[in-house]
Image (tube, grey):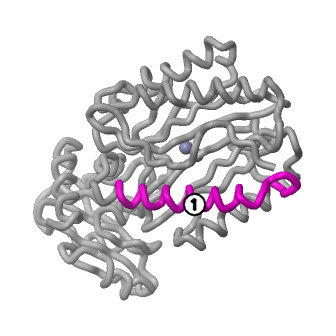
Amino acid sequence: MRPAQTRAERLLASLDRAGADVLLVTDLTGVRYLTGYTGSNGLALVGPHLRAFVTDFRYVEQAAEEVDPSYEQVVAPAPQELPEMLPALLPEDGIVRLGFDDVHLSVREHARLRDLLDDRTVLIPAGGITEGLRRVKEPAEVEAIAAATRVADQAFEAVLGRGIVGRTERELALALEIELRERGADAPSFETIVAAGAHGALPHARPRAVAVEPGDMVVFDWGARLRGYCSDCTRTVAAGSVSEEAREAYELVLRAQLAGLAAVRAGADGRQTDAVARELIAAAGHGEHFGHGLGHGVGLDIHEAPRLSPRSTDADRLLAGDVVTVEPGVYLPGKLGIRIEDLVVVREDGCQVLTGVPKELRIVD
Ligand code: ZN
Ligand code: ZN
């Protein structure tokens, strides 16, 4: 069976649990996962006896190439909006319980849907179904994420090899993105972070036109998108020799990261896995300096289920085949930030680290 067929089968099981007969998939990542379509306007309908994909004139040829043949392809005539095609596609008799994506659909879009459909169609909130299906990765998906990770690793080594002192954060971020694309990445998987010195204390810092100075700790957080799949990695590098405080903080984060990695395995609880790293950092007096979760799922989206954090729920318990990050940090306002992040595949007895960039403190001029 092709992936699109197995994925649709799995979807039908979740559909039943949500109390819907047919799922309307409007989130483009979900549409891509189910049908293979990578364009920017499209929706899918999936039910026991229904597989339909709707797009507009601009994507007809692309859809013909990409969309799995199990889907009937429908082109909305201009200037119609895609949902206008729904009444003709839904079953003609009886009540239809149509699941819609209440996570992504706007209130306005929902009202429009209600207007278009007759009283036989009951709208059932069914957000999160495709996200749930996407969580555990198929072997080919793991291979795509591993390939994106290799591209990202090589790009980083190329940039570090040319030195960092005297170059601005923006120059370094741009150099990293060029290296990613030259190695075949579709794009960076998110906005590259390069943050030197005190700026590194902002976990989601934007690169500035400020040069790296000797003595700075420099946080790099970057990733490649390859064949649609994301990679995610953070390394913190010393620009020349750094203070004793910086070294100690680095060693602490590294210990927490290794402890976090050691705790990752199928069946592990999201909160407890987070706590393994968090308690080490707290015991060293930096509890309040680690203000984000330990990790998140990565796939077609850069942030997806599950999450490893103090707010994880039972749904975040790790499953074999989850791809997650392990990324503790210590952020000292006005001084420095340190984060170390690897991307791993959860296995029954532990995890397989995809990231290949070394983690011992690197001193780069
Ligand atoms: Zn990251
Ligand atoms: Zn991350």
Front one among 74 and 4: 4
| Helix, strand or loop: magenta stretch | helix
Front one among 282 and 252: 252
Image quarter where the N terminus lies is bottom left
Residue 155 in magenta stretch: yes
Secondary structure of the residue carrying numbered label 1: helix
Tell me if 256 is positioned left or right of 203 in this view. Answer: left
Q: Residue 209 placed where, x, y %?
A: 86, 56
Q: Is residue 182 above or below residue 9?
A: below
Q: Residue 157 placed where, x, y %?
A: 64, 57
Tell me if 295 is positioned left or right of 23 in this view. Answer: right
Tell me if 191 is positioned left or right of 346 in this view. Answer: right
Ligand 2 resides in the quarter of the picture at top right
Type of amino acid at the residue the image marks with label 1: Gln
Front one among 211 and 331: 211
Q: Which residues are magenta?
A: 142-169
Residue at 51% from the left image edge and 29% from the top image edge: 258
Provide the residue designation for mark 1: 154
Q: Residue 104 placed where, x, y %?
A: 45, 52
